[in-house]
Image (cartoon, rainbow, N blue to C red):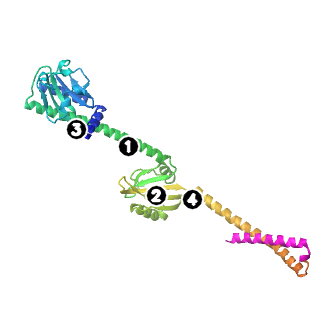
Amino acid sequence: MPKRELERLRAVNRFLKLKISKEEELQEIVSLAAEICGTPTALITLIDADTQYIPIKQAFNFKTTPRTQAFCNHVIEQQDVMIVPDALSDERFINNPLVTGDPNIRFYAGTPLTTQDGLNLGSLCVIDQVPGHLSEEQQQMLQMLAQQVIQLLEFDASLELLKDQFLTAKKEELTMRSFFDSCTCAHLLLDLDLKVIAYSKAMSDFVREHHDVSIAPGFAIMDLIDPVDRDRVILACQDALQGRSTRMERHLEFNDKDTAYWWDVAVHPARNPDGEIIGVSYNGSDISERVRQKESAEAQRLQLDEIAFVQSHELRRPVATIKGLLTLIDMEGYLYNSERLLAIQKNTERLDNHIHRIVSYTTN
């Protein structure tokens, strides 16, 4: 199947699924076409791979016909008005069931419904049960009405597309907002002037609790940052606008001095789908508990070091005394004559080596 026909069929399928909101206007066009051309019947048709669909009609009993029987199947192969003055005199249609039976077509005139992409989806046509003809003016009017038909259909298609895109975007927004707000981290998206574009619930709650203000798009969030490290934060944001990321730890204290936090802050460039920097992504995580645990662990380590140091030195005194006594005994020549004294000397040396290792560990 040619690529152009595949594109045409996809377009037809899209319009067939379309919920038409301009049905009344289309019905008026069909009635006007029949009146201008002096025929009892007029149709708007759409032709897919096998079937001719008739969504809008006047004085016609069928909602569909096989494509092989459709006069309009010949119309979509051209750009001008196709006129069949007498179907019984036209070899293409003389044996057509629509001619030999209901609705007994004798006269037919149709012009293609052509999209802006140049795809012929179907036709606007008029039908009579007696031979006929159209003047040049009537043909022009039929073509003008066909243009109005396709404009109305494409308007509905565009409206449907926009609606689908809106619903998709809304769904994505709700998904992202749900993810954004369920996170315990405080997020901000700032524009090029460092004004708020978007924010997470955690950030909003934090600002409301500690600054008693409500942030909103356009809010100058930098006004809330402590002057002590405002310059550092602004510099990090300016670096982000130049494409560089920054990570820092901030110690936050508030007026009552009883409330303080440690925050791990990451400042990144915010980019659009084309990679262009549109602002700053500011993300803060409360690491107060982690810092407290680290400080507590450090304090415990220092305390244990001190205990170990003190105990090791306390232990060295009796060991040093024992070693001194053993030295005196050795000088008298008694040491090597006593297995017990030799065992004491051996264990004392071993204990002294352990104490040396403890002292060495606590002083490094």
Mark 1 vs mark 2, CA separation in Å: 32 Å
Mark 4 vs mark 2, CA separation in Å: 17 Å
Give the residue pinned by disc 2.
Answer: 224
Give, as a single range, the part of the protein colored magenta.
Answer: 336-364
Quarter assignment of residue 171: top left
Mark 3 vs mark 2, CA separation in Å: 59 Å
Do tag 1 and tag 3 residues touch (Cβ < 8 Å)? Answer: no
* Image position, residue 3 (x, y; %): 26, 40
Mark 1 vs mark 3, CA separation in Å: 29 Å
Image disc number at residue 257: 4
Give the residue pinned by disc 1.
Answer: 169
Circle 1 SS class:
helix
Badge 2: residue crowd in 10 Å (few <14, some 14–19, many ≥20): few
Q: Residue at x 46, y 44 (%)?
A: 178
Give the residue pinned by disc 3.
Answer: 119
Mark 1 vs mark 4, CA separation in Å: 44 Å
Do tag 1 and tag 2 residues touch (Cβ < 8 Å)? Answer: no
Q: Residue furthest top?
A: 101
- Which mark lies nearer to you, 1 or 3? 3
Which is nearer the eye, 76 or 198? 76
* Image position, residue 131 (x, y; %): 10, 22
Compare marks 3 and 2 and give the one earlier in the sequence: 3
Residue type, numbered disc 2: Leu
Residue type, numbered disc 1: Ala
Residue type, numbered disc 4: Lys
- Which mark lies nearer to you, 4 or 3? 3
